[in-house]
Amino acid sequence: MSSEFEQNLKKYAKVIVKVGLNLQPGQRLLIGGLTLSNDGTPLEFAPLVRLIAKEAYQIGARLVDVMWGDDQLRLIRFQHAPKDSFEVFPKWRIDAEVKIGEAGDADLVIVSSDPELLREQDPQLITKFQQTFFKHVKPLSDLISKNAMNWLAASGATDGWANKVFPTFPKKSRKAKLWDSIFEICRVKEKDPISAWRDHIDQLGKRKDYLNSKKYNELKLIAPGTDLTIGLPKGHKWVGGITTTQNGINFTPNMPTEEIFTIPHKDKTEGIVSSTKPLYYGGVIIEDFRLKFSEGRIIEVKAKKGADFLLKTLETDNGARYLGEIALVPHSSPISQSDLLFYNTLIDENAAIHVAFGRARKFNLENGEEMSDDDFAGVGGNLSLIHIDFMIGSGEMDVDGITEDGTFEPIMRNGEWAFKV
Ligand code: ZN
């Protein structure tokens, strides 16, 4: 490994601990929760995890603990475990994260995604596996939705993932290339990454404040294949860059992050939307799809690839067919400019304007954190076990905000911000 790589990895660890988590003296840090992509922190990340632990202890962390995982073990389970065992779930992993959240400590996941890992496995088993995951992850999603703790989802390169993103590069250099891209889009290669992040977060904050001051009634999104009106609930909050926990810690929950997002009113989306990038979701790729909405509900689904899987996912529960997020990202974002497809929503969602079907977040609504599920749904918040982002933006998308009296105001033109801050 080159010393340049080691230096970048060290800077990455610092950015993760100081900006992403903003870990506080006296906090515990748990690394390696369960995600749809990974059963824990991939063993390949041990060098990064050790650097993170050092940074954390230097700040005054009381204990850094790790739950390891391994993609190959997941594959072995699909290949060899009894077919009727896929509703068995390692609940202790979620319990550990919930305890961290309830105590107001910090939680970090470092994800990697190998889109081909489960390619040859039985789709029914994959669906069963996902349903089991969603059934058990709710207590954790609830804590996240309430900003109970400072948490961060970041990513790291693994061989399986690098093979998919850089298939034309010599095999030996692919992982280094993916690490390099991650460093690039996470501003690690800047001279002073911490201050570069502060500037970036500041910019996002100004855009967010502008949109919050506007209190738009609706958004109108127009692009080839898309003509969508999204009603926004009263008291919706645009969120981006920094988020604050209930006990007052400012943290940045995603790295990279380029988005400013809010909550759609669950019953007020009308029209048609087309995807502009493939959606990689839990082992399956869904491509070139179009959704038609009426009164907030997806009433028609067309997809060139992965239609069955998409339909199955939309059957998860009642809320799965309604939107839970609309996020604005300029087409000139560094991730969009890299022109790479990462097959990883954490990164790809920051390349384009996107929406998510499924669960809305309570922190996107004024006083939402204190609302019960019923109250939240009553004012337009969507409830679901799933939350799946998909990309709809491009250099051809225009977005307008529609005010209470019906005036259209430009928010984005040809994929770029149309207002000054
Ligand atoms: Zn998003």
Image (spheres, helix red, strand yellow):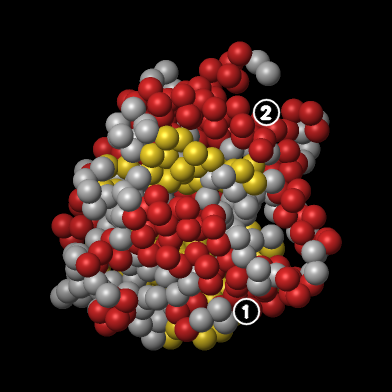
Question: Circle 1 is placed at which residue position?
Answer: 311
| Cα–Cα gap, marks 1 and 2 | 37 Å
Above-or-below relation of 102 to 333: below
Q: What residue do we see at 34% from left, 27% from top?
A: 60
Q: Position of residue 76 (x, y in %)?
A: 80, 55
Image quadrant holding the C terminus, namely: top left
Amino acid type of the residue tagged 2 in the rendering: Ala
Residue sitting at x 42%, y 57% = 98
Image-based side of 276 in relation to 62, left or right: right
Specify whether 366 is left or right of 74: left
Residue 239 can be seen in this image: yes
Q: Position of residue 209 (x, y in %)?
A: 20, 51
Label 2 residue SS: helix
Judge by depth and name the residue closer to the eye, 212 or 172: 172
Q: Is residue 338 above or below residue 265?
A: above
Residue 111: x and y in percent read 57, 46
Q: Does the rendering let one see residue 221?
A: no
Task: Say which residue label 2 marks.
Answer: 176
Per the image, label 1 sits on a secondary structure element best described as helix
Residue density around tag 2, few if under 14, some if 14–19, many if 20 or more, within 10 Å: some
Labels 1 and 2 touching (C-beta < 8 A) = no
Badge 1 amino acid: Leu
Disc 2 C-beta below 8 A from ligand 1: no
Q: Bin the neighbour count of mark 1 within 10 Å (Cα to Cα): few under 14, some 14-19, many 20 and up.
A: some
